[in-house]
């Protein structure tokens, strides 16, 4: 169960990072 929970946590972190990149990428591109 520890391995499964670790994999689930990693997938959640990856999804959050991807969501942040998609959300903040336009803001970063627009900043001078």
Image (cartoon, rainbow, N blue to C red):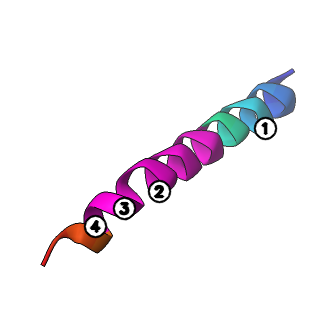
Where does label 1 land, which residue? Answer: 7
Main SS of the magenta segment? helix
Q: Does residue 2 appear to the left or right of 14 in the view shown?
A: right
- Image height of 21 relative to 19, above or below: below
Identified at 17% across, 70% down, the residue is 31
Tell me the SS state at disc 4: helix
Label 1 vs label 4: CA separation?
30 Å
Of the 4 image quadrants, the one containing the N terminus is top right
Answer yes or no: do the residues labelled 1 and 4 have beta carbons within 8 Å? Answer: no
* Front of the two marks 3 and 1: 3
Where does label 2 land, which residue? Answer: 21
Where does label 3 land, which residue? Answer: 26
List x then y, in percent, for residue 9.
Answer: 67, 32
Q: From the viewer's side, name the closer residue of 25 and 4.
A: 25
* Front of the two marks 1 and 4: 4
Label 2 vs label 1: CA separation?
21 Å
Label 3 vs label 1: CA separation?
30 Å
Where does label 4 land, which residue? Answer: 28
């Amino acid at each position: 169960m520890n391995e499964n929970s670790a994999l689930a946590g990693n997938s959640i972190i990856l999804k959050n990072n991807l969501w942040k990149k998609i959300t903040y990428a336009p803001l970063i591109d627009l900043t001078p």
